[in-house]
Amino acid sequence: MRHFAEGDLVSVLTTQPLDRLLDYKAPEGGCFQGAFVEVPLGPRKVLGVVWGDGEGGYDLAKVRSVIRVLDAVPMRDEMRQFLIRAAEYTLTPMPAMLRLATRSPGLGDPPAMRVIYRRGTVEEPDRWTPARQKVVAVLEDFGGLAFTLAELAEMAGVSTSVVKGLVKQGVVAEEESPRDLPYPRLDPTPRGDVALTEEQAHAARALRTGVAARQYGTALLKGVTGSGKTEVYLEAVAACLEAGRQALVLLPEIALTAEFLTRVEDRFGARPAEWHSGVTMTERRRAWKMVSENGAQLVVGARSALFLPYQDLGLIVVDEEHDTSYKQEDGVLYNARDMAVLRASMTGAQVVLASATPSLESWANADAGKYTRLTLTSRFGEAIMPEMRAIDMRAEALPANRWISDTLAGAVRHRLGEGEQSLLFLNRRGYAPVTICRACGHQIGCDHCDARMVEHRFQKRLMCHQCGETKPMPSVCPSCEAEDRLAPVGPGVERITEEVTSLFPEARTALLSSDLYGSARALKAQIEDIAAGGADIIIGTQIVAKGHNFPHLTLVGVIDADLGLQGSDLRAAERTFQLMRQVAGRAGRAEKPGVALMQTYQPEHPVIRAILSGEEEEFWRAEAAERKMAGVPPYGRMAGIVLSSPDVAEVFDFGKALAARTAPLHQIGAQVFGPAAAPIARIRGRHRVRLLVKAEKTAPLQRALAAWLGQFRVPTNLRVAVDIDPQSFY
Ligand code: ADP
Ligand code: ZN
């Protein structure tokens, strides 16, 4: 690693939104290339990384010095290259990439001791109070983790004096410890009690061989829910640990990590590092540090875990790789799946993309031979894929304001009699998507967005799903002031729950919707309760589709299988197919066979038919052929340009100016569509205009986009967001 001597001119990349590197003098003692440093910028001190030689050309006497080198392992060359390539790919300014890579609280803090609290040796206090029980429950829930006093008190929802009281009695132990401790070593030795099936063993061998080769490679691990994908990729993790390299497992949903961590603990004897928005600041800091210092062998996390400072990354698993939450939709617009492949290709690591319903992108790469295809065809043990049937809603003649057909209700009733669980799925939060005035026809909209307000009856509020704004449900129409004429139109999950309660008053119902849980912990607790049989009928949005295990569930009813097919999204068919197959896969995980019933007004629709028949390969081939014809991803390249500004005229003018000077795009044969008002034409008071750029697969799109956009000076209030391979078009 290069070392600069004191006084040498170095260039520093800072996290500040500047379009260039800044020159500084190396501090006393010098610094390494890649060192994390604090530098002066005007009157402020800012975080940066020593990037290389200073550019010079200034009055040297005026160049300021680096203030100090932070106590962190310098950024490795490979990481710098990764950030550069990721920035080029996503057309993101480097300071924003660096912010992604330094999301560690207290990065600049000196190494220090701190007081931590963990479970003590005394089992029981003199007397159990509810507050004391809560403290002990938090410590036991989180295994060996230690907390600071403030963290522990907050997580338990008690005052710090409760914790101190338990310390006095030895139930909680108080210790001095270095601020950041290494994670316990994981033991990759095979566990005796699991014998992989032949198919599983074949896939595991292929992955192990890949990891042992220490070369880049990507495998698409495809298998229905319950076929043992997790079991198989844990073998790849084991191989990676044996090789002494680090592994990363990405999960699409925080609520899934709890279940997965338990499996890691069962398999490797300890818990790995966790990285997502639900972990405490202290743990985030520890994870970031330990990943860079050989103190963390395995990280389980959300997409941003890709930007941690690994020393030697040997494996990245992207579980549920088709999941749309891997695409970050604000700030840096990147797809974690693509960035995983990029990062792995630069460090000689293996990627495992696991899914029951892969994205068409990954399917096409496997089809073209770029990815190894590993398939698990059957469910483990007794469990078989559920039988799938359509309920033709045209024949059901439902009365107004009812959404559960007699056929579906009959099936639910049957499960109730058998003591089995049913799940009713509707991908719509809230009570009703539209609130209309029966007197004047006015629909209640958001004041800041071009969107309707959604009624959330449990919270007694209207909510905008674009900006999150809420207001109380009015009793008079905001337009004509008629009293008591506002009426809900259409169903959300809360309204389905109401219908379920009136149809089955004796049943225990549980509603799973992301907005109803204050924390990932509360959601996890609810999921565990359901899994243990704590509900007869579950009503849920798409959060139920993601990998949770409900062993007593034998019926899945889809309230509106047509919902995702509306709209112009090019992935509408793919998404509906994936979501319906995922949801159906929730049924019949244990010994009892499952059934999935889909309510649809168009049972002949090709996508609905493909879902029912389970002819997946046929579906993918048909979908691939259509995309090829249209020249859209993955067979062509696309970039979405979203302009937004509080000034509607300005945003349209700028859009027209962009569309008028497209020479750099035409040079690579790209086409430009728009400007046009975005489908949601206003969000948070900003007017939105879209352009779409389409190019052939091999065209150097990013370079052309940069040249094109570089021709313009962007007005101060206007934002330009470039979205390469857009996943959403709102
Ligand atoms: P997937 O990730 O494909 O949904 P999992 O790996 O979670 O599948 O497997 C589903 C269930 O079956 C889990 O409880 C898992 O422990 C169990 N299982 C899978 N394969 C085996 C095996 N070979 N031996 C024992 N249990 C297995
Ligand atoms: Zn809004």
Image (spheres, rainbow, N blue to C red):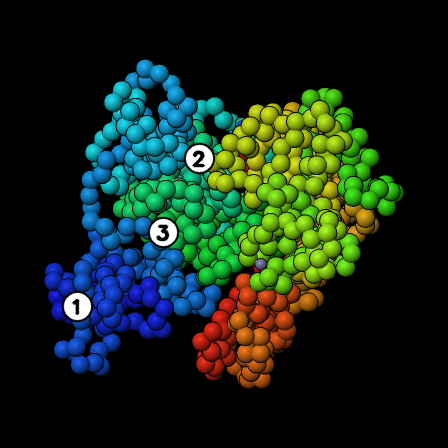
- Which amino acid does the dot numbered 2 rest on? Leu
Picture coordinates of residue 709 (x, y %)?
49, 78
Residue 575 vs 32, above or below: the answer is above
State left or right for residue 146 relative to residue 656: left
Q: Which residue is mark 2?
A: 261
Secondary structure under tag 2 reads: helix
Residue at image position (19%, 65%) is: 66
The CA span between labels 1 and 2 is: 45 Å
Q: Earlier in the sequence, mark 3 or mark 1?
A: 1
Which sits in the foreground, 503 or 580? 503
Mark 1 against mark 2, which lies toward the viewer?
Answer: 1
Does the residue at mark 1 contact the one at mark 2 (Cβ under 8 Å)?
Answer: no
Q: Which residue is mark 3?
A: 308
State ligand 1's quadrant. top right
Residue 642 vs 226, above or below: the answer is below
| Badge 3: residue crowd in 10 Å (few <14, some 14–19, many ≥20) | many
- Which amino acid does the dot numbered 1 rest on? Ser
Picture coordinates of residue 689 (x, y %)?
59, 71
Q: Which residue is mark 1?
A: 65
- Which amino acid does the dot numbered 3 rest on? Leu
Q: Earlier in the sequence, mark 3 or mark 2?
A: 2
> Does ligand 2 reach within 8 Å of label 1's beta carbon?
no
